[in-house]
Structure formats: structure tokens, C-alpha cells
């Protein structure tokens, strides 16, 4: 158990590719144990697991509790911080300040003192001073990769610049990393005679020679610096126990070049070292400034501004990326949440678990974060555990009083339980952490808070930073670096500096798309055509035959005028809607809807089931979708009563959107755009992860007509919660079969796949599995159809990873200052990565805050498609999502796949009826 708050390193997001500077304490106790002269003197201590806690305070291990907890829960999480690690896996940084010792308590047998950190860096990372890293000696074994460089550019000479569009100057949130011409990063092999096994001791042996070595990074075997040492170089450290010398040999291995991943790692560690001098607070990987917090007193919230930073090698050199971020902190505690549940009545334990399990809390006493996996109602703060350090039993009340000078007011509250992750267990740290709810602040917004319009508006007013203010914040950050003498000294010692201004890029604006509707066409106005479509007919309409409406009896008088509006706007757009069969329901429980739908659908065949709910109810919605889609294979539409109330113009707008949604589900094509090619197939794939059931749902959609407006879809439930799909071959074979039927027994000439939700670390595996499966499916389809009389079908394939959660921002500069770039802005230079065939696309207009571009990384491409065509096709596809008369941030096929994966994963967890695989029933 761990009442003192040793947090685990768990991150719910993917690695962003920047390395961390995680404070460690030095180990003079081990130095003396191994007979090394005590040139530093601190009390012995050990640290525990860290969950990216903001307080970099290592803590001592504690002992087993006096009684075991009950009913532990489980949760899905990814570890981003270390378990208790042996110092043999740490890397030292000359001249770093030591950490501070403290104590902690955890169940399980006592372990020998070890050094750990607040977050584990990626493989190959090194740490400055008393910081962690994982270079050499197998330190990266089993550790998540955070900065994986996969070369997807066809060749170094390949030109990935597009041509179409009007040039526009933009700047971006990057600063150039400037190196002195004579700056060379050198690598040395370090050997000890006699040999020293413990890396922590090795570090101690060379630390005394900082005046000779200069600034350096050391992983226990390899040392990095920018000072060319005499060769050969032998230094000596003296043991205290017997007065004998340990000879330390330094042998130059060579220079580390900028293309090497190690070079990037070193740059990021130096950056982290500098950021640690800014008096900021670290949360997970990022730095926040609590001194600049903004209070929202009416909602009991605080907002901390912060910086997300990373250094990477881009097209023309190394750039420092800086994103302005915010952390919303609540003022209530986990105990406050429990008290609210108690006041609501019912099964208190069940209510508390439903509200708190899976949430993340931050301890007040050392600002570290934990995920709540269970609540132990058999324990309370009066429970005792054995404090190993003092070899005695102690209660939680006494421990917090003596250790942190804290008084726990509620001595009967249950204890929160945070379980070790799989990575923690692999490191031998397999005991749960126990926390007092009263001392744990809630993080993140609750579901009720997210539904509070005024609260979200007030938060958004702070977190949505306009472009000009964002640029000001970036320049302020740069000035903070420049005005700090310690940071300048650190950078100068490595021969580094940062440019004074953010970088400029050459961008282009792709011409606006023309929306085609029923013989009419009109240009898009800044990515929005919601008004224009109301006056035009659909490109392709369908017949709505018999349909049925289930509604609470009390809402019958409201649904009939709404249906009349749908018929009116449908007629204007060529979608004829007949009178439905309206079924009033006296009772509107979930079971009533299920029974009524089953009864009516067994009597008569319907083409649409339309349900009105009094309020939004997830269980009722899920039951309706599961029955209509999986059991009966009938598209369904569900709306809530609030959509039937309001002013006439508002109701007309809602009726228009619902009508288009219904028509699309039945196979209509409300609009089209001109696409660069018509004999291709475009595919979208996305994955939904269900942490509760530890399953994943992979959704696949593929175009089956020349205008990319009709799609085949299929779903696969992954029992192992895996992101990479093992079913791509089956998905594509079904799509090719439908394409073959729909296109006069022809198959697509080329296939372009847009893949969402993949981190850099998965790209290599993605190419080995999903890309390979696509090619196998094509071969099978050719053989089974005896395609073109030869049975050979090997179409060229482009596989594109699409990422919208990125930290790159662009600013259109004018005489009025910085603004958002217009829709269709493409950037394919300067800030793109030199190892990738990639580009950025701004496809939406944003009026509040700064627009977020989307990244396109073409990881496989034998199509010969020019970069210009890739960019134009991606932009065109952002116009073809029929649930929204405007552009998206991502191509429509991905959005369709996302909707399908979410529907099945969140509400159904069953396979849809195969009769629906050519209809977008998931809209």
C-alpha cells in the first residue's frame, strides 16, 4: 500500500515522441556500501512507482498492511512511469541537483533500496543529472517506445511537395534549434578495472571527475558529451573501505550524427533539464505554471496553463515544438464525490464504484496522480500497516499526521485502491496502493460537468486560445528561456541555442470544392453549405416505404408536426416521406420499446424504425440499436424529446438534418464533390476500445462507387482489445466483392486506405499485418473472380495513417497579426518530418480558438500517385460526410468507420445484420 502517494506511471494516451527529464536522487548510501569515497552525503532512501506526478519527490518503500483489501477492481491503462527500478538501469547527468527523500507505504515484502523517477523515458533515452534513462544494459526491455522513427519516405531524394493552390505564408509553433558550428556530440565507452556491476555505483565513480569530463550523459556503459577527451584517458576513484583505486577507462567510439535517434534523445534530455529550471510543475510529461492559474470560482475549478514540448529532426534540421496547453483541476475530493452519492440514496457502495472507478485522482500532499481501480470498504484511515523503516505498526491517521502534518477529519471513510499495471508487475512491483479519499483531489471533468453548458463555455473561454494570443504565449515562453541565466549556461555548455522567432513555412490553399446536388452546383463557403443544400435536390434519392414511429403517448402531439416538417423539407430535396405508422406508448421503459418493436416488426416489414425518447437514455438507445440493427437488419433513427421543442426556425433546421440522416441511412446521396479519380477504392478504418470489457471493435468502410459516396462496411470485435486488426483480409475481400457487383464486374484500379488511431510505434507492425492482409485479399479476389481471364489482381495500394491529435499549429500572418489559415491550407515542408512522406491539411474553419491541422503520413505507396493528388483527394473526402453539411478534420471514410466502431462498441457489442453492409445505418 502507498498512503504517501507514490504514483504509478500510467498514461492514457500514446507516446508523443519527446523524452523526459525525471528527477532522481543520488545514492551515497550505495556508494559507501561499495566502498566509494563519500563525495556526496545524503540519507539513504528509495523511491516508488511514479504516475507522472507533478512533485518530483522520491519516497521510501513501505511494508505490508495489517489486513488485506477486498474486491479489487480492474482497469485498462498504459504505463508511462517506472516501477521501482534498480539503479543499474539509470543514467546520470553531471551536475544535477539531488532529489528529496521521503517515505511511503506499500503492501508486500520489503525490497532493497532502489532509485526511480516520476516517469519512464523511452528506449534509448538518457537523463541529465540525477535523471532516469534507458540506454544500455537492457534497460529498455519491456518499455513503451515513445519516439519511434519509421522511415516511410520512398527515398531521400523523393520530393513530397504538392503544386496545386495559391501560396500563403504561415508560421508554426516551432523554434529552430541552433548549434554552434564546432558542436559535435561524442560517444565514449567507459570500462572499470576491477569491474563494477552496479550501474549506480559506476555513475558515482565517474561523477567525481566532472571537471575533466565537462557536461555529460552516462548510461552506465556509454558516455556522451561535446568535449573531446584525451585518448587514451584513465581516471581513478578511491574506495573508502580498503583505500584501493578503481581505474576508469574512457575510449572514444565516435561521433553521433544528427540522423541517429540517440542524437534526438540527447537534445530532448537537455531541453527537459532547461525546463526544470523554469519553476514549473511537471504533470505526466508536460510542464504547467500554477502561478499563472485562472480560477473559475462559480464552478469550483482552476485552470493551469502549461507547455508541451519536444525536439525532433524535421525537414531542414532540428526544431523545438511548443504547444500551449491547459490542465483543468477540480476543487472537490474523492470523499466529496462519495458524500454526494450517499445523499442520492440507494446502494452506496455500488454508486461510489460506478462514479469513481476508472477516474484519476491527485494527492494533495505530493501532487501525484493515481487511477482508482477499486474502493475497499473494509478499510479506513484507522486501519494499520507495518512501517518497515521503523519496524512497527502504524495507522494511516498517524502516518499522515507525522509524515505530512495532515489531519484526516473523517476516520471512517473507505480507502481507494490503485492496482499495479502489467508493467509494474513485470518490474516486481505487484502490490496495490491505498489512498484516503479526503486527501485525493478529483481530476478531469465529470460527466455532469461536461453536460453543463455554462461550465464548458467558461472553461472554453480560457482554454480556447486565439491565434494571436497563442503566438504571444509562444514568444513569452521563448523569452523565459532567454532570460534565465542557468538555462543559458546549460545551453551554452552544449553549444546550443534556440531561434528568437517561430519558424515560417510555405503553404498553399487548395481551391474550394464545388458541391454537386440534383443538377445544381455551388462552391463551398468556408467549408459550410448548410444553407445551400436546403434549396436543392439530392444527387440520388431513395424510396422510403413503410416506416414506423414509436413515441411516448404524451409526446404524440409533438412528433406529428415534426414529421410534417420532415415531409416538407424532404419533398424539396426529392426525398418523399409517406405517413408513418405511429405507435403511442403508455410506458416508455426500455423493455416497453423492445417489446413493441419486436411485436410490430413480426407483423409487418418496415424499411425504417423511428423512436422518440423522452430523455437521453443510453440503455434504451443501446437496446433499440441492438435489436433493429443486429436482429432485424432495419435502419433505425432515435431522437429525444428536446429536439421536438423550440422555435419554428430551430425545429426546421433539426427536421432537415434528421431527414438527410434518415435518407442517407437508406442509401441516398445528398451531395457529391468532384474527386481526382473515379476508378479507385477509398477505405477508412478505425478502432473503438472498450476498457470495461477489455475488447476492441475494428470498423472498416470502403467505397463501392465512382464518386466515393456509397460504402460497404464490416465490423470485427477483437477479444484482446488489440488496435491492429487481424481481419483486414476478410474486410477487404467483402468490399471487393461488393465493388465487383456494383461496377459491372470490375475491380478498383488503385486502393487508398486511410487509417486512424495508430501511434508511431505501431507503424512497422501495421505494415506487416494490415498492409500485407490487403494484398492477400486482392490476390484472393482476383483468383475467385478469374479477373480479366487471368485471375491475377494486384492493384497498387497507398496506406495513409491519419492523425488529428497532434500538436502542430499554423498561423496565417497578416498586417492585423496572426490568424487561422483558411480551409484547404496544405503544408508539406519545413515542419514535416524528413523520414516521412507526409503533409498537414487544414480542412475546417474555426472561429473560436486556434485551428488544429490533420497529419497525413503515407507509410506505404506503390500507386505512383503524386503528392498533389494525395493532398487534393484527402481534402475532397472531408466534404463527403452526410451527417454534416460542412467539412471535417478527417476524410469521410474514417469518420464513417469511427461512427460504426463507436456504435457497435458502445451500444451493441454484437455483429450487425449482414443485410445492412451496403447502407450507412451507423450515422
Image (cartoon, rainbow, N blue to C red):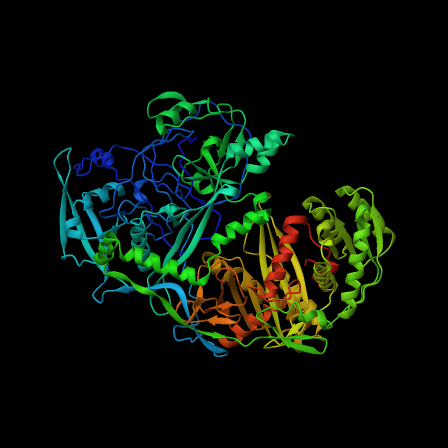
Please name the residue shown 40% across and 36% down the image: 6
Q: In the shown orientation, is residue 807 left or right of residue 272?
A: right
Figure quadrant of the C terminus: bottom right
Q: Position of residue 591 (x, y in %)?
A: 77, 42
Q: Position of residue 915 (x, y in %)?
A: 75, 60
Please name the residue shown 68% across and 64% down the image: 712
Q: In the shown orientation, is residue 429 left or right of residue 613?
A: left
Q: In the shown orientation, is residue 388 left or right of residue 382?
A: left
Figure quadrant of the N terminus: top left
Asked if 475 appears above or below 78 in the picture, the reply is: below
Asked if 4 appears above or below 752 in the picture, the reply is: above
Q: Where on the picture, by quarter, is residue 474?
A: bottom left
Please name the residue shown 54% across and 38% down the image: 74
Asked if 629 appears above or below 569 in the picture, the reply is: above
Res. 170 in view? yes
Q: Position of residue 803 (x, y in %)?
A: 50, 61
Q: Nearer the viewer, residue 230 or 225?
A: 225
Amino acid at each position: 500500500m502507498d498512503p504517501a502517494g507514490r504514483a504509478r506511471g500510467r498514461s492514457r494516451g500514446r507516446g508523443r515522441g519527446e523524452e523526459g527529464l525525471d528527477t532522481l536522487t543520488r545514492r551515497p548510501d550505495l556508494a559507501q556500501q561499495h566502498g566509494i569515497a563519500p563525495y556526496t552525503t545524503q540519507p539513504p532512501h528509495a523511491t516508488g512507482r511514479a504516475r507522472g506526478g507533478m512533485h518530483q519527490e522520491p519516497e521510501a518503500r513501505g511494508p505490508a498492511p495489517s489486513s488485506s483489501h477486498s474486491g479489487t477492481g480492474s482497469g485498462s491503462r498504459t504505463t508511462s512511469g517506472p516501477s521501482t527500478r534498480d539503479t543499474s538501469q539509470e543514467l546520470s547527468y553531471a551536475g544535477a541537483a539531488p532529489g528529496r527523500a521521503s517515505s511511503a507505504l506499500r503492501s508486500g515484502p520489503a525490497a532493497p533500496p532502489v532509485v526511480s523517477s516520476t516517469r519512464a523515458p523511452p528506449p534509448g533515452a538518457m537523463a541529465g543529472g540525477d535523471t532516469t534513462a534507458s540506454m544500455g544494459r537492457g534497460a529498455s526491455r519491456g518499455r513503451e517506445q515513445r519516439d519511434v522513427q519509421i522511415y516511410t519516405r520512398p527515398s531521400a531524394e523523393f520530393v513530397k511537395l504538392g503544386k496545386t493552390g495559391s501560396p500563403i505564408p504561415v508560421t508554426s509553433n516551432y523554434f529552430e534549434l541552433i548549434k554552434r558550428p564546432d558542436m559535435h556530440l561524442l560517444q565514449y565507452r567507459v570500462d572499470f578495472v576491477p569491474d563494477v556491476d552496479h550501474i549506480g555505483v559506476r555513475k558515482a565513480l565517474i561523477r567525481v571527475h566532472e571537471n575533466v569530463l565537462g557536461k555529460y550523459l552516462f548510461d552506465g556503459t556509454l558516455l556522451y558529451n561535446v568535449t573531446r577527451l584525451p585518448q587514451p584517458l584513465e581516471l581513478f576513484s578511491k574506495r573508502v573501505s580498503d583505500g584501493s583505486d578503481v581505474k576508469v577507462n574512457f575510449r572514444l567510439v565516435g561521433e553521433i550524427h544528427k540522423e541517429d535517434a540517440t542524437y534526438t534523445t540527447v537534445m530532448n534530455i537537455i531541453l527537459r533539464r532547461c525546463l526544470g529550471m523554469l519553476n514549473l510543475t511537471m504533470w505526466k510529461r508536460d510542464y504547467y505554471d500554477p502561478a499563472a492559474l485562472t480560477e473559475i470560482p462559480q464552478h469550483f475549478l482552476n485552470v493551469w496553463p502549461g507547455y508541451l514540448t519536444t525536439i525532433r529532426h524535421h525537414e531542414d534540421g532540428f526544431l523545438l515544438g511548443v504547444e500551449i496547453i491547459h490542465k483543468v483541476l477540480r476543487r472537490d475530493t474523492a470523499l466529496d464525490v462519495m458524500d454526494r452519492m450517499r445523499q442520492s440514496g440507494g446502494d452506496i457502495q455500488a454508486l461510489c464504484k460506478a462514479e469513481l472507478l476508472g477516474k484519476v485522482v491527485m494527492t494533495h500532499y505530493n501532487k501525484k496522480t493515481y487511477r482508482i481501480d477499486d474502493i475497499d470498504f473494509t478499510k479506513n484511515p484507522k486501519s494499520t500497516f507495518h512501517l518497515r523503516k521503523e519496524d512497527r505498526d502504524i495507522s494511516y491517521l498517524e502516518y499522515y499526521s507525522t509524515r505530512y502534518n495532515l489531519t484526516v477529519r473523517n476516520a471512517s471513510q473507505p480507502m481507494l485502491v490503485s492496482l499495479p499495471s502489467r508493467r509494474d508487475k513485470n518490474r516486481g512491483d505487484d502490490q496495490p496502493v491505498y489512498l484516503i479519499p479526503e486527501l485525493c483531489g478529483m481530476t478531469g471533468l465529470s460527466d455532469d460537468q461536461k453536460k453543463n453548458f455554462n461550465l464548458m463555455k467558461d472553461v472554453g473561454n480560457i482554454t480556447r486560445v486565439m491565434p494571436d494570443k497563442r503566438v504571444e504565449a509562444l514568444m513569452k515562453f521563448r523569452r523565459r528561456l532567454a532570460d534565465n541565466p542557468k538555462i543559458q549556461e546549460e545551453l551554452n555548455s552544449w553549444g546550443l541555442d534556440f531561434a528568437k522567432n517561430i519558424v515560417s513555412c510555405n503553404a498553399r490553399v487548395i481551391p474550394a470544392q464545388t458541391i454537386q446536388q440534383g443538377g445544381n452546383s455551388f462552391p463551398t463557403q468556408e467549408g459550410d453549405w448548410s444553407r445551400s443544400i436546403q434549396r436543392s435536390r439530392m444527387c440520388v434519392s431513395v424510396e422510403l416505404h413503410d416506416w414506423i414511429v414509436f413515441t411516448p403517448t404524451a409526446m404524440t402531439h409533438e412528433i406529428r408536426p415534426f414529421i410534417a416538417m420532415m415531409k416538407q423539407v424532404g419533398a424539396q430535396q426529392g426525398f418523399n416521406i409517406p405517413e408513418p405508422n405511429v405507435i403511442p406508448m403508455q410506458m416508455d421503459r426500455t423493455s416497453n420499446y423492445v417489446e413493441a418493436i419486436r411485436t410490430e416488426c413480426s407483423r409487418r416489414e418496415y424499411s425504417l424504425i423511428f423512436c422518440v425518447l423522452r430523455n437521453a437514455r443510453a440503455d434504451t438507445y443501446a437496446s433499440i440499436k441492438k435489436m433493429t440493427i443486429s436482429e432485424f437488419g432495419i435502419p433505425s433513427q432515435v431522437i429525444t424529446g428536446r429536439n421536438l421543442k423550440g422555435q419554428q426556425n430551430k425545429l426546421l433546421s433539426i427536421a432537415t438534418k434528421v431527414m438527410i440522416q434518415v435518407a442517407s441511412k437508406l442509401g441516398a446521396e445528398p451531395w457529391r464533390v468532384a474527386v481526382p479519380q473515379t476508378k479507385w477504392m477509398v477505405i477508412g478504418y478505425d478502432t473503438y476500445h472498450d476498457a470495461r470489457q477489455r475488447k476492441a471493435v475494428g470498423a472498416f468502410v470502403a467505397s463501392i462507387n465512382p464518386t466515393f459516396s456509397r460504402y460497404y462496411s464490416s465490423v470485427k470485435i477483437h477479444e484482446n482489445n488489440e488496435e491492429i486488426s487481424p481481419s483486414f483480409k476478410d474486410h477487404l475481400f467483402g468490399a471487393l466483392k461488393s465493388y465487383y457487383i456494383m461496377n459491372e464486374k470490375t475491380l478498383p484500379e488503385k486502393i487508398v486506405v486511410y487509417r486512424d488511431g495508430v501511434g508511431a510505434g505501431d507503424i512497422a507492425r501495421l505494415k506487416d499485418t494490415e498492409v500485407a492482409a490487403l494484398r492477400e485479399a486482392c490476390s484472393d479476389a482476383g483468383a475467385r473472380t478469374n479477373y480479366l481471364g487471368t485471375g491475377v489482381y494486384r492493384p497498387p495500394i497507398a496506406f495513409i495513417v491519419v492523425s488529428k491529435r497532434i500538436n502542430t499549429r499554423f498561423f496565417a500572418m497578416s498586417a492585423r497579426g496572426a490568424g487561422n489559415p483558411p480551409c484547404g491550407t496544405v503544408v508539406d515542408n519545413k515542419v514535416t518530418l524528413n523520414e516521412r512522406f507526409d503533409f498537414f491539411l487544414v480542412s475546417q474553419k474555426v472561429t473560436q480558438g486556434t485551428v488544429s491541422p490533420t497529419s497525413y503520413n503515407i507509410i506505404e505507396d506503390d500507386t505512383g500517385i503524386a503528392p498533389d493528388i494525395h493532398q487534393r483527394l484527402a481534402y475532397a473526402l472531408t466534404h463527403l460526410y452526410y451527417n454534416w453539411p460542412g467539412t471535417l478534420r478527417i476524410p469521410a471514410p474514417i469518420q464513417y468507420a469511427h461512427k460504426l466502431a463507436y456504435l457497435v462498441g458502445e451500444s451493441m457489442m454484437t455483429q450487425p445484420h449482414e443485410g445492412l453492409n451496403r447502407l450507412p445505418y451507423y450515422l
